[in-house]
Amino acid sequence: MKEYIYVNSYPRSGSTFTETCLNFMYMSKEHEVVLDTPAKLLHSPELLLENLQGILQVSIIRNPIHAISSFMIKDIYELKVAPTIQSKNFKKYVESKVDYYKQYIDALKINSSNLLIIDFELIKNDIKSQLNIISNFIDREMNMTVDESVEESRRYLLNSSRHNHLTNSLPIEKPKLYFEYCDYIEKNFDLT
Protein backbone atom coordinates (compact mmCIF):
# COMPACT_ATOMS: atom_id res chain seq x y z
CA MET A 1 0.00 0.00 0.00
CA LYS A 2 1.12 3.53 -0.76
CA GLU A 3 0.60 6.78 1.13
CA TYR A 4 1.22 9.31 -1.65
CA ILE A 5 0.31 9.54 -5.32
CA TYR A 6 2.32 11.17 -8.10
CA VAL A 7 0.21 11.81 -11.17
CA ASN A 8 3.10 11.96 -13.61
CA SER A 9 2.01 12.30 -17.24
CA TYR A 10 2.73 14.16 -20.43
CA PRO A 11 0.93 17.52 -20.20
CA ARG A 12 -2.67 17.68 -21.46
CA SER A 13 -3.45 14.08 -20.53
CA GLY A 14 -6.05 14.55 -17.81
CA SER A 15 -3.49 14.69 -15.04
CA THR A 16 -4.63 17.99 -13.47
CA PHE A 17 -8.23 16.85 -13.11
CA THR A 18 -7.15 13.44 -11.78
CA GLU A 19 -4.76 14.99 -9.25
CA THR A 20 -7.41 17.48 -8.09
CA CYS A 21 -9.96 14.70 -7.58
CA LEU A 22 -7.46 12.63 -5.58
CA ASN A 23 -6.59 15.55 -3.34
CA PHE A 24 -10.25 16.22 -2.60
CA MET A 25 -10.74 12.52 -1.84
CA TYR A 26 -7.85 12.23 0.60
CA MET A 27 -7.20 15.66 2.09
CA SER A 28 -8.86 16.40 5.39
CA LYS A 29 -11.49 19.14 5.27
CA GLU A 30 -9.44 21.51 7.42
CA HIS A 31 -6.21 20.77 5.51
CA GLU A 32 -4.83 23.90 3.84
CA VAL A 33 -1.11 23.13 3.46
CA VAL A 34 -0.51 22.48 -0.23
CA LEU A 35 2.96 21.03 0.41
CA ASP A 36 1.53 17.98 2.17
CA THR A 37 -1.19 17.06 -0.29
CA PRO A 38 -1.59 13.32 -0.84
CA ALA A 39 -1.43 13.68 -4.65
CA LYS A 40 1.13 15.68 -6.58
CA LEU A 41 1.02 16.67 -10.25
CA LEU A 42 4.30 16.13 -12.07
CA HIS A 43 5.58 16.24 -15.62
CA SER A 44 8.84 14.33 -15.20
CA PRO A 45 9.59 11.42 -17.51
CA GLU A 46 12.86 10.85 -15.63
CA LEU A 47 10.98 10.20 -12.38
CA LEU A 48 8.88 7.53 -14.11
CA LEU A 49 12.04 5.42 -14.22
CA GLU A 50 12.18 5.29 -10.41
CA ASN A 51 10.53 2.85 -8.02
CA LEU A 52 9.58 5.26 -5.24
CA GLN A 53 9.02 3.92 -1.73
CA GLY A 54 5.53 4.71 -0.41
CA ILE A 55 4.48 6.50 -3.60
CA LEU A 56 2.15 5.27 -6.32
CA GLN A 57 3.07 6.76 -9.68
CA VAL A 58 0.07 7.08 -12.00
CA SER A 59 0.67 7.95 -15.62
CA ILE A 60 -2.13 8.75 -18.05
CA ILE A 61 -1.54 7.96 -21.71
CA ARG A 62 -3.32 9.99 -24.37
CA ASN A 63 -3.26 9.60 -28.14
CA PRO A 64 0.07 11.31 -28.96
CA ILE A 65 -1.32 13.44 -31.79
CA HIS A 66 -4.06 14.80 -29.55
CA ALA A 67 -1.82 15.26 -26.50
CA ILE A 68 0.85 17.12 -28.46
CA SER A 69 -1.67 19.30 -30.30
CA SER A 70 -3.39 20.15 -27.03
CA PHE A 71 -0.05 21.03 -25.43
CA MET A 72 0.64 23.36 -28.37
CA ILE A 73 -2.77 25.01 -27.92
CA LYS A 74 -1.99 25.50 -24.21
CA ASP A 75 1.17 27.36 -25.27
CA ILE A 76 -1.05 29.80 -27.16
CA TYR A 77 -3.03 30.57 -24.01
CA GLU A 78 0.11 31.00 -21.92
CA LEU A 79 2.40 32.73 -24.43
CA LYS A 80 -0.33 34.66 -26.24
CA VAL A 81 1.29 33.60 -29.55
CA ALA A 82 -0.08 31.08 -32.03
CA PRO A 83 2.70 29.23 -33.83
CA THR A 84 1.57 28.71 -37.41
CA ILE A 85 2.44 25.84 -39.69
CA GLN A 86 3.96 28.36 -42.12
CA SER A 87 6.33 29.88 -39.56
CA LYS A 88 10.03 29.32 -40.03
CA ASN A 89 10.71 27.33 -36.84
CA PHE A 90 7.41 25.48 -36.64
CA LYS A 91 8.86 22.03 -37.40
CA LYS A 92 11.50 22.45 -34.68
CA TYR A 93 8.83 23.57 -32.26
CA VAL A 94 6.74 20.48 -32.97
CA GLU A 95 9.82 18.22 -32.85
CA SER A 96 10.52 19.43 -29.30
CA LYS A 97 6.97 18.50 -28.22
CA VAL A 98 7.21 15.10 -29.97
CA ASP A 99 10.60 14.35 -28.40
CA TYR A 100 9.20 15.23 -24.97
CA TYR A 101 6.27 12.86 -25.54
CA LYS A 102 8.64 10.06 -26.59
CA GLN A 103 10.57 10.48 -23.33
CA TYR A 104 7.38 9.55 -21.46
CA ILE A 105 6.64 6.56 -23.65
CA ASP A 106 10.21 5.26 -23.33
CA ALA A 107 10.12 5.60 -19.54
CA LEU A 108 6.75 3.84 -19.37
CA LYS A 109 8.08 0.94 -21.44
CA ILE A 110 11.15 0.57 -19.23
CA ASN A 111 9.39 0.77 -15.85
CA SER A 112 5.77 -0.24 -16.52
CA SER A 113 5.80 -2.86 -13.75
CA ASN A 114 6.24 -0.11 -11.13
CA LEU A 115 3.59 2.25 -12.49
CA LEU A 116 -0.18 2.43 -12.75
CA ILE A 117 -0.81 3.36 -16.39
CA ILE A 118 -4.29 4.57 -17.35
CA ASP A 119 -5.69 5.38 -20.78
CA PHE A 120 -6.82 9.01 -21.17
CA GLU A 121 -10.17 7.90 -22.66
CA LEU A 122 -10.95 6.09 -19.39
CA ILE A 123 -10.19 9.26 -17.42
CA LYS A 124 -12.28 11.34 -19.81
CA ASN A 125 -15.27 8.98 -19.97
CA ASP A 126 -15.26 7.25 -16.58
CA ILE A 127 -12.95 8.97 -14.12
CA LYS A 128 -14.92 7.62 -11.16
CA SER A 129 -14.01 3.99 -11.89
CA GLN A 130 -10.36 5.00 -12.40
CA LEU A 131 -10.30 6.85 -9.08
CA ASN A 132 -11.69 3.73 -7.42
CA ILE A 133 -8.89 1.65 -8.97
CA ILE A 134 -6.26 4.13 -7.74
CA SER A 135 -7.79 4.13 -4.26
CA ASN A 136 -7.19 0.36 -4.01
CA PHE A 137 -3.45 1.10 -3.81
CA ILE A 138 -3.65 3.91 -1.23
CA ASP A 139 -3.32 3.53 2.52
CA ARG A 140 -5.14 6.71 3.56
CA GLU A 141 -8.57 7.45 4.89
CA MET A 142 -10.88 8.93 2.28
CA ASN A 143 -12.40 12.19 3.46
CA MET A 144 -14.74 12.54 0.50
CA THR A 145 -16.45 9.98 -1.72
CA VAL A 146 -15.34 9.56 -5.32
CA ASP A 147 -18.58 11.16 -6.54
CA GLU A 148 -18.15 14.13 -4.20
CA SER A 149 -14.50 14.60 -5.19
CA VAL A 150 -15.33 14.64 -8.91
CA GLU A 151 -18.08 17.22 -8.44
CA GLU A 152 -15.97 19.34 -6.09
CA SER A 153 -13.02 19.19 -8.50
CA ARG A 154 -15.16 20.30 -11.44
CA ARG A 155 -16.49 23.21 -9.40
CA TYR A 156 -13.03 24.13 -8.18
CA LEU A 157 -11.43 24.04 -11.65
CA LEU A 158 -14.31 25.87 -13.33
CA ASN A 159 -14.50 28.62 -10.71
CA SER A 160 -10.82 29.11 -9.95
CA SER A 161 -9.89 32.26 -11.78
CA ARG A 162 -6.96 32.62 -9.37
CA HIS A 163 -5.41 29.48 -10.88
CA ASN A 164 -4.39 30.72 -14.31
CA HIS A 165 -1.81 27.93 -14.60
CA LEU A 166 -4.74 25.50 -14.84
CA THR A 167 -5.45 26.42 -18.46
CA ASN A 168 -8.31 24.30 -19.78
CA SER A 169 -8.08 21.65 -17.08
CA LEU A 170 -11.50 20.44 -18.15
CA PRO A 171 -12.52 19.56 -21.73
CA ILE A 172 -13.30 22.49 -24.00
CA GLU A 173 -14.46 22.83 -27.58
CA LYS A 174 -11.33 22.50 -29.68
CA PRO A 175 -10.32 25.51 -31.80
CA LYS A 176 -9.73 25.07 -35.54
CA LEU A 177 -5.97 25.40 -35.00
CA TYR A 178 -5.98 22.27 -32.83
CA PHE A 179 -7.15 20.20 -35.81
CA GLU A 180 -4.57 21.82 -38.08
CA TYR A 181 -1.87 20.84 -35.58
CA CYS A 182 -3.25 17.30 -35.45
CA ASP A 183 -3.12 16.99 -39.24
CA TYR A 184 0.41 18.38 -39.39
CA ILE A 185 1.70 15.99 -36.72
CA GLU A 186 0.00 12.99 -38.29
CA LYS A 187 1.50 13.76 -41.72
CA ASN A 188 5.02 14.64 -40.55
CA PHE A 189 5.83 12.45 -37.54
CA ASP A 190 5.83 8.72 -36.86
CA LEU A 191 4.38 8.23 -33.39
CA THR A 192 3.81 4.48 -33.50
Image: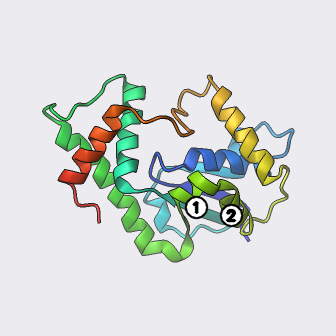
Image height of 97 relative to 175, above or below: below
Give the labeled residue for mark 2. 134
| x then y, percent, for residue 172 | 51, 35
Tell me the element at label 1: strand
Image height of 156 relative to 91, above or below: above
* Furthest-bottom residue in this view: 113
- Looking at numbered disc 2 in the image, what kind of residue is underneath it? Ile
| x then y, percent, for residue 137 | 71, 69
User: At x 63% / y 64%, what residue is drawn?
Assistant: 56
Image height of 58 relative to 51, above or below: above
For this view, does 39 lie left or right of residue 57? right
| Disc assigned to residue 92 | none
Tell me the element at label 2: helix
**Of the image marks 2 and 1, the number of the one nearer the N terminus:** 1
- Looking at numbered disc 1 in the image, what kind of residue is underneath it? Val
- Identify the image quadrant of the C terminus: bottom left
Image height of 117 relative to 86, above or below: below
Give the labeled residue for mark 1. 58
- Identify the image quadrant of the N terminus: bottom right
